[in-house]
Image (tube, grey):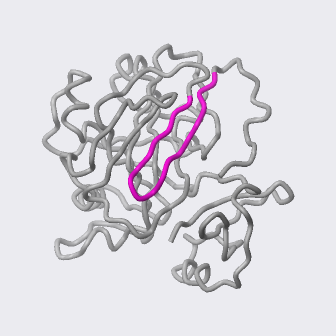
Amino acid sequence: MRLCRFQTSTDPQARYGLIVGDCVRALLDADPFAAANALDSLAHAAEQALPLVEIKLLAPVKPSKIVCVGRNYREHAAELGNKMPDEPLLFLKAPSSIIGPEDAIRLPPESSQVEHEGELCVVIGRRLSRLADGENPLDYVLGYACVNDVTARDLQRKDVQFTRAKSFDTFCPVGPFIETELDPLDLQVETRVNGEIKQHARTSAMAFDVPFLLRYISRAMTLLPGDIVATGTPAGVSRLKDGDIVEVEVEGIGAIRNQVKSSETPASGESGRTR
């Protein structure tokens, strides 16, 4: 299933639905993360249909936390002059940084070096805490999306720790929807800027795969339904400038597209409808 969150021009309330072909069907007003039977209710809802061209896709999640993994691809660690960690390098990104498809990535005046980091995003579906050795971590996953872990690289170097550099408003595009039927172990991840491929790798090249990461994270903090894990970025990060179009595409999901805008650019007209 492809689970989306959206609004229409006539109803600003965010709703959930299933993408089927070029329409959103089986509409649901409730939050599918709020109850165990929510997805079943969505799948069996009376079938309605709205063309995708008539809706605005929103970020499909509103997580309590965004857990990110640093240096999970060896080539990316090398390009920044960093050693590979012996264990997953975890950090948090502010949930207020999340935006959806076609929303603008804003360049803050505090930074002169903002870079893209395209990644596979894991969306948690069930409460996950201290997973036992015999349990399958993927049983706790609702699905997967694309995520761009936008980073103010100059501030990351200046601050040493990552919080400010990763958490500016608009620094976490997520979407375009959640794909619930996907094997995360060997997927192509690609980032394009103005159509030019900047990052290209497969998740099989991760130092720590998705099941390992979920088990490891669950022994440090409780993951709640709707929380997301950004699994690390491949080599090829590059600086973004005003007017750039950034696309992060993950095999089996699709792509999330965002335009980069300076902090001085007027914000009006950003939220037009999109497929």
| In this view, 103 is above or below 240 | below
Q: Position of residue 99 (x, y in %)?
A: 60, 43
Where residue 168 sits in the image (x, y, percent)? 54, 31
* In magenta stretch: residue 258: yes
Lateral position of residue 188 relative to residue 269, left or right = left
Does the segment drawn in magenta span residue 109?
Answer: no
Percent across and percent down for residue 275 are 65, 52
- Specify the quadrant of the image occupied by residue 261: top right
* Residue 183 occupies quadrant: bottom left
Q: Nearer the viewer, residue 198 or 169?
A: 198
88 on left or right of 198: left
* Pick the front one: 163 or 151: 151
Majority SS type along the magenta span? strand
Q: Position of residue 196 (x, y in %)?
A: 44, 28
Range shown magenta = 245-261
Name the residue located 65 percent from the left edge and 67 percent from the top edge.
16
